Image (spheres, helix red, strand yellow):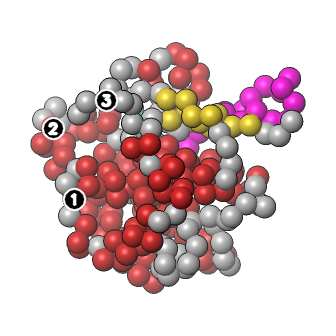
Amino acid sequence: MPTSYRLYHYWRSSSSWRVRFALDLKGISYEPVAVSLLNGESESSEHLSRNPAGSVPVLEIQAQSPSTTPLLLTESLAILLYLEESHPDRPSLLRGDTITRAQTLALSEVINSGIQPFHNPPVLARHSSEPEEQKAWARDFIERGLGIYEALCQKTRGRFSVGDHPSIADACLIPQIYSAERFGVKLQAFPSIQAIHENLKVLPAFASSHADAFKPLDFKG
Ligand SMILES: N[C@@H](CCC(=O)N[C@@H](CS)C(=O)NCC(=O)O)C(=O)O
């Protein structure tokens, strides 16, 4: 029996989308299980037992034998690195020499640590109860972070953020651009990012992992 995967995720969660993109790009099948961030589901005791942070994604790994207890892995970058190391036969998202791989992780961290946490729903709610003020706060951090990403990727990019193959950095960038647009960030200031995004859009994994492909039919807002 091969290892099987279940991904606890939310359609619009950028961290979840990174993992969906990596799984699809590598051609690894998985069972998606939606955990809503809006109706308390992510704070339920059931989900907290999967992830004490009450956040998504969580990757459930059922190894070879059905009698083995499934493993639960949290933190999207750790999950991406796990998928990378456990499937060396699949297209790699972390290529090149030591420096190139470190540069790839640096770009990923600009988004993972430097942007996403600032527009995470609990942080927005703690900052302000006013939707417009929340959006302005999110825009500030996204614009600052994308400016850093733009400067760094000008030195590493080819067709994608690092060279000519999609990487972990692109897995972080795709959903970050979606969030940027959602909060009203103008992307014209980031020409390299825009060019990379155009190249990412044609990958089958772009469409199959896209938030819209998982958006609940009855979602309003
Ligand atoms: N560093 C974590 C961040 C996870 C995270 O913040 N996920 C968001 C959605 S993108 C979430 O579940 N937010 C709800 C919460 O934190 O309560 C990762 O990369 O997995």
**Which residues are the magenta region?**
60-78
Residue 185 is tagged as: 1
Task: Name the amino acid, label 2.
Answer: Pro
| SS category of the residue bearing label 3 | loop
Q: Is residue 144 above or below residue 78?
A: below
Residue position marked by numbered label 2 in the rendering: 131
Indicate the quadrant of ligand 1 in the picture: top left
Viewer-closest of 77 and 17: 17
Q: Can you tell me whether the CB of the residue at mark 3 lies under 8 Å from the nearest atom of ligand 1?
A: no
Residue position marked by numbered label 3 in the rendering: 219
* Residue 105 visible to the viewer: no
Task: Name the amino acid, label 1.
Answer: Val
For residue 33, what is the image quadrant?
Answer: top right
Task: Name the amino acid, label 3.
Answer: Phe
Q: Residue at x 42, y 58 (%)?
A: 174
Question: Residue 63 in magenta?
Answer: yes
